[in-house]
Image (cartoon, rainbow, N blue to C red):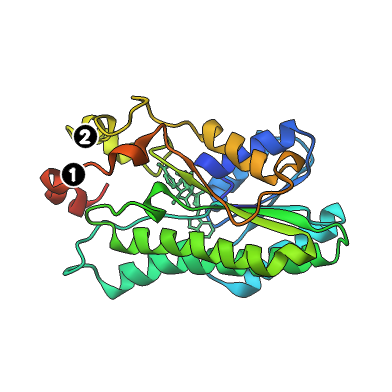
């Protein structure tokens, strides 16, 4: 089961899973993107319209996965978005939206995925997508960075509780990755260069870079790894976050 699987990193995970022979349920709130993603993939893919903020919808998606495919072995929780705003101005609504999707959505997904995995007898593996912002603050990003730091701790706490039950829980923290979420950065003069100045490998990550890391953590090769946060950022954490203050006004306007 892949939440946020209709686009970007989630979709790359779906494609890689299908290529490896898995049956996949894509859970996403964007029904048009879901239909498009589903159309390009084979018959072993099911799509479910799910808002990860709603427990009944998440629980139903897990039930559908088990009903369609017999069991749930792997959960990848990718649904997420951000809202730009300085802490003195950020609205309660924007704070709630980001925290609810990025953090509460991961809680609800892990809760119901793990419950289904308990029935397997053989356990399972869950990979949550956080961000480099789980470790590094971002100007104008207080809701997002707080949610992503929360995802890392939530995953470690879940790993602690679920390890005896043979369920591993890990986090992938992507750096700057080329997806619809970040495409707006290319439209603001100077932002891409500001990021590149901080990324020692001098390139964007691809959704496939992130899918490779996520599938590794879900695989038997990572059988003794749980509670880890794998940073996949081209070395970016070594050089800190770019100074986004010069782009404040444009970023506040939004895409
Ligand atoms: P994306 O916008 O391409 O994909 C995000 C998907 O999540 C979309 O399909 C969207 O419809 C879905 N989604 C949003 N709200 C939802 C909800 N309430 N319920 C269900 N689905 C919902 O973005 P992406 O870059 O692939 O992001 C995937 C994850 O990676 C996110 O958690 C994001 O925070 C994280 N991330 C991305 C980057 C990056 O540079 N792109 C960096 C670090 C972390």
The residue shown at (55%, 31%) is 208
The residue shown at (32%, 72%) is 93
Towards the viewer: 139 or 254 = 139
| Residue 35 picture location, percent across and down | 61, 45
Rounded to the nearest angstrom, the CA distance separating label 1 from label 2 is: 7 Å
The residue under label 1 is 243
Q: Is the CB of mark 1 within 8 Å of ligand 1?
A: no
| Residue 238 picture location, percent across and down | 34, 38
In this rendering, position of residue 78 left or right of residue 217: left
Q: Is residue 12 visible?
A: no
The residue under label 2 is 194
Image vertical order of residue 15 relative to residue 241, above or below: above
| Label 1 secondary element | loop
In this rendering, position of residue 176 left or right of residue 88: right
In this rendering, position of residue 229 left or right of residue 216: left
CB atoms of marks 1 and 2 within 8 Å: yes
| Residue 211 picture location, percent across and down | 59, 37
Q: Earlier in the sequence, mark 1 or mark 2?
A: 2
Towards the viewer: 225 or 122 = 225
Q: Which numbered marker is on residue 216? A: none
| Label 2 secondary element | helix
In this rendering, position of residue 244 left or right of residue 161: left
Towards the viewer: 160 or 35 = 160
Q: Is the CB of mark 2 within 8 Å of ligand 1?
A: no
In which image quadrant can residue 38 be found? top right
The residue shown at (78%, 44%) is 23
Q: Is residue 194 visible?
A: yes
Mark 1 Cα shell of 10 Å, populated few (<14), some (14-19), many (≥20) = some
Residue furthest top as drawn: 202
Mark 2 Cα shell of 10 Å, populated few (<14), some (14-19), many (≥20) = some
């Amino acid at each position: 089961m892949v939440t946020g699987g209709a686009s970007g990193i989630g979709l790359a995970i779906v494609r890689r899973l299908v290529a490896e022979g898995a049956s996949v349920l894509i859970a996403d709130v964007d029904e048009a993107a879901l239909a498009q993603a589903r159309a390009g993939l084979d018959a072993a893919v099911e799509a479910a319209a799910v808002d990860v903020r709603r427990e009944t919808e998440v629980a139903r998606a897990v039930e559908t996965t088990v009903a369609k495919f017999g069991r749930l072995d792997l959960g990848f929780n990718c649904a997420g978005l951000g809202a730009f705003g300085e802490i003195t101005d950020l609205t309660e609504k924007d704070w709630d939206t980001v925290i609810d999707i990025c953090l509460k959505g991961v809680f609800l997904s892990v809760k119901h995925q793990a419950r289904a995995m308990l029935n397997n007898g053989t356990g399972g593996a869950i990979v949550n997508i956080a961000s480099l912002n789980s470790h590094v603050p971002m100007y104008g990003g207080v809701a997002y960075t707080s949610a992503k730091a929360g995802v890392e701790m939530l995953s470690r706490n879940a790993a602690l509780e679920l390890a005896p039950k043979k369920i591993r829980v890990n986090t992938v923290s992507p750096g700057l990755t080329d997806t619809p979420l970040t495409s707006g950065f290319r439209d603001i003069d100077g932002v891409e260069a500001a990021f590149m100045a901080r990324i020692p490998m001098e390139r964007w990550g691809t959704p496939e870079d992130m899918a490779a890391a996520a599938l590794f953590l879900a695989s038997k090769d990572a059988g003794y790894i749980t509670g880890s946060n794998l940073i996949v950022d081209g070395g970016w954490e070594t050089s800190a976050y770019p100074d986004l203050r010069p782009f404040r006004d444009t970023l506040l306007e939004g895409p």
